[in-house]
Amino acid sequence: MRGSRGLRAAAIASLLLLNASPGFGQEDERYRLSGYVRVAETNEVIRSARLRVGELGFVAESNRFGFYTLLLEPGTYEIEVSSIGYDVVTRTVVMVGPQTLDFALSVRPLVLEDITVETEQDPPDIDPTTVEMSIARLDVPALSRVPVVLGEADPVRALTLFPGVSTANDATTALNVRGGSTDENQILLDDSQVFNPAHAIGLFSSFNPDAIDDVTLYKGAIPSRYGGRLSSVLEIQQREGNSREFEGAASIGLLASRLSVQGPLFDGSGSYLFAARRTYADLFLKLSNDPDLKESTAYFYDLNAKANYRYGATGQVMLSGYFGRDRFRVSDVVSVGWGNAAGTIRWNQGFGSLFSHVTLAYSDYDYELVNGFNTVGVSWDSRVRSLNAKIDEEWTIGRGSILEFGISLTDYMIEPANITPTGGSSVVARRFEEQRGLSPEAYVEHEVELGRATLRYGLRGTGFVRRGPGTVLQYENDAPVVFNPGLGRYEPGVVTDTTFFSGGKKLSEDWGLEPRASVRFGLTGTSSVKASYSRTRQYLRLVTNTNSTSPLDIWEPVGPYVRPSTADQYAVGYARTFSRGAYSLSAEIYYKRMRDLVDYVDGAQLLLNERLETTILPAEGRGYGFELFLRKNTGKLQGWASYTYANADQRSPGISAADPGIAGGAWYAAPYDRTHDVTFTGIYPLGESWTLGANFVFASGLPTTFPVSRYEFGGLILGEFGPRNAERLPAYHRLDVSLTKKFARNELHFGFFNVYNRFNSQALSFRQSQESPFVTEAAQFSVFGIVPSISYRFFF
Amino acid sequence: MNGNARRLAVRRGALMCLTVLMAGTSACERIVQVDLEEGPKRLVVEGRIERVKEGPSGAQAIRLTTTDAFFSNQATPPATGATVTVRDDMDGVFPFSETAPGTYTTTGLSAEVGRTYTLTIVWEGDTYVSSATARAVPAVDRLYFVYEEETAITEVAGFRATIDYTDPAGIANFYLWEQIVDGRNQLLPDPGNAFNLISKDEFYDGQAVVAYQPNDEIALQAGQDIEIRQVALSREAYDFYLALFEQNALGSGDPFSIPPANVRGNVANTTTPDRRALGFFEAAEVSVAQAVVPEQE
């Protein structure tokens, strides 16, 4: 097995380190101090807050549930707790035995009047004192001050302002992370995976900013507890809700209205949050005189709900749910609707220095399409469902030594298509075969401080077992795709046999190990170098070959003919804070190698195709890049700047030496290969109540393909194309500006997306003119010109 | 149900949504100048050997043209001076002669269902070969005209040519419809239109199809002579037309369109394999129905 030598070395090293870790075997000399870090005003937890033990100078972080554990020798300590957006709290703690202590931090007003550089600073997400690297963490409260398209603050779109994160065009929020495709991001909402978090054909993500308080994107150095996708993990946590008092907020925008309420439950030992959002463009359609438009509709909505109950010092039970749906209907001719449903139940409990969470998560994505165009009218729907149960443990072994481990089991069920005739149609009802799979996972990870160095290393084992019922076709020479050299094209293989596997029988199984390791070495108190390696594996792929992913793309699991994809990523970085913490800087380089990807043959029909293996060629990918991130944390002007240089290639050499693969089997630019990407984001207070926000983005154009000649067939003019993705679209740039006026209980937000109305070409088509059939032309398309927006928000 | 449902639905849905969302913004398309490199000249074959179900098949024609610079903006150059021969699998040989520049015709040949025809072209020193087997087509049961009112979707009011046909059960059928208006084949470079012109029976095998409008975007005028030709395609030919229409539809700027790719036909160059011909050669049974568009009542 590939990488087995590395694994053995890691195993040996882990044994050595566990023995060498300072806390090991000395447990009795220290007492445990643990508890939650919370927001003073609402009692909500603060994730990733930093705790610094003054005398000792070492730091710990609250985990993603806001829980922290410190092991301290008997004595008196000054403990200073800080987190971005909150005032620093310092408390004196006397350790004479184990104790539980919650820290409460007050929200710091966002608009700072005085230019003062404070002595104690927020911990930025590019902290030189932690081993974590390759992370983009979004400050959700600040999101409301940053300009956004159409007045809808979108946490996923905002991530494109960070280095290494981009989208194919302005019409989509599907992310390309460090040269990975859009289906390589594991998107978790309260631990429930969300399969297609897109509204309005991708213009907006499913995440209502009122309902969430933490958005963390792991672009590399992915902690061992996460997996399932090659390129990144996007972890989104819904807010817990205010457990001190009732609080409500509502906003009215051009596109949508939002409402959120939160408050205490069970006399303050619990809290709830409920948030809703709905667009109302469809109301204007009703005013139309046109009978077709009058009967049409176009809307989306989101519902977010969360409730939790706390008991004892560390126990907590949490329920979280999300429902979102889009519906577009054009008269009775066509209608399309899709939506996600996700739910999570979680139980958290501290047992001494062990923090334990048990999670049950359910997720469902479905779409339905009705086409009543003619008498072969059809309605078809598709669905992907997952049910996951897992146990995660966090054991603080000693000072700076934490062991995490866990197991998980996920059941997947995919219904690729269920076809039903519409009234009077001659279509015959049919259900495509369901695809079922079970994916067990287990991991262990140890983080340890060794003097000026911090080491984190872990191992993750995962598998995917395809289960019946299911039909597997056998092909001549085991080749589902064959190359026809005479005609220079790939064709489906010849079916020689069909095997039916009954319910529960195993169709195929794949297993693999994912080693991960990160190391930090502190150079000075405020700077460090970091390095990481991570392997990731992916068992589900989105079947798509269109320029943007669409809501109607389906997920395809690995199986007898599709192998799991793997990626190895190496990264080295430098992080430092300077000017007494006023600025933080990180620089990283990475190299990524991806194997067992798929590419589709020219002319592949992916829609309603039960034999997708006949359209797939094996492929591989590679990417490297340099990322620079500078953040200004204090003063009047706050914000960040980023620069990315990146390269992403792919290659599909074909099945055997005799066939050319795709693009002659040579490396070619991936469709999302963005060479340069520069962003600036800033917030600046104007007087007492106004805040100015701005973004500037400059990026290289994406690859495209040019024709080298044209020909006619059946009266249609077609291009004959040159090498794939060998040319580039023009560079992309734009400036967005926003103004926010804050009153006592409400605020008014004005925004301009693409202020100078740049025509950003996001597609280039070579086409036959509709006016004159012998004329061919090149047309560029842009998504957004200048887009003004206004929204009003009030609190109650 | 052909593969266009998603495309149409999503595109129309997307357009609807974007139109509403972006009212007042300047999102748009513009025509630009692009410098292109010019690739090698290739032979393009458009050939179909037919048998008309309802009557005499008439002369068979094969059209040969060549590729041209992408922005040449002139009539397609004919490939002249070629030697064109079709052989059937019963030792029948049918030479074609060039009756107009690039158009090669023969009389006395009519495709027979189940028989395989091999096309050989010798042009500019290279020999090109292709073969096709003629497939049976069900008859157009009825051709009539349905009047559509003008709405945001229908766009132009008027009669639409409408047909009924019955798909034969138990075999995979693939269809192409040609709509000939006053003697002219109306295949317009309009993606919305093109996707109704082909269909496969995967989801309606053996069913009677009623009131199908293969060309529902073309409004007809009273008194026009309409001929609908229902052509039996092979699976390969269907895939070829689908790829052709998809590639031609890229000009809409639709974000859900596929990236540009070369459409591969079924004509091989046996002399210089890398210098493949473009286009397609097929053999088919065709059902023809004719009618005159009535006055609006």
Image (spheres, rainbow, N blue to C red):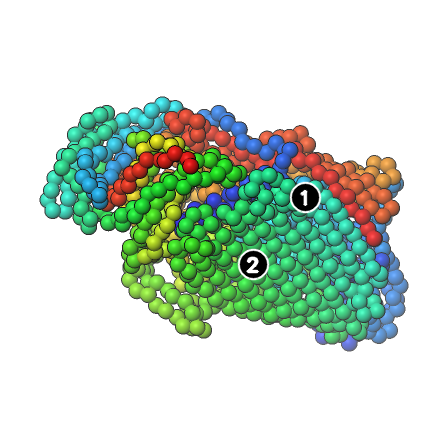
Q: Residue A255: which disc? A: 1
Q: Are marks 2 and 1 on the same chain?
A: yes
Q: Which chain carries label 1?
A: A
Q: Residue at x 59, y 34 (%)?
A: B27
Could you tell me residue B14's position as x and y percent? Answer: 55, 43
Could you tell me residue A380's position as x and y percent? Answer: 47, 56
Please report whichever mark, 2 or 1, sits nearer to the chain's N-terminal start: 1
Q: Residue A365: which disc? A: 2
Report the residue that reaches farthest toward the left: B91
Is A6 situated left or right of A472 in this image? Answer: right
Q: Distance between the residues labelled 2 and 1?
A: 24 Å
Report the residue that reaches farthest toward the bottom: A28
Q: Residue at x 41, y 61 (%)?
A: A430
Could you tell me residue A501's position as x and y percent? Answer: 39, 70
Q: Residue at x 74, y 45 (%)?
A: A252
Q: Mark 2 lies on which chain?
A: A
Residue depth check, mark 2 versus mark 1: number of the one nearer the observer:
1
Is label 2 in contact with label 1 (beta carbons under 8 Å)? no
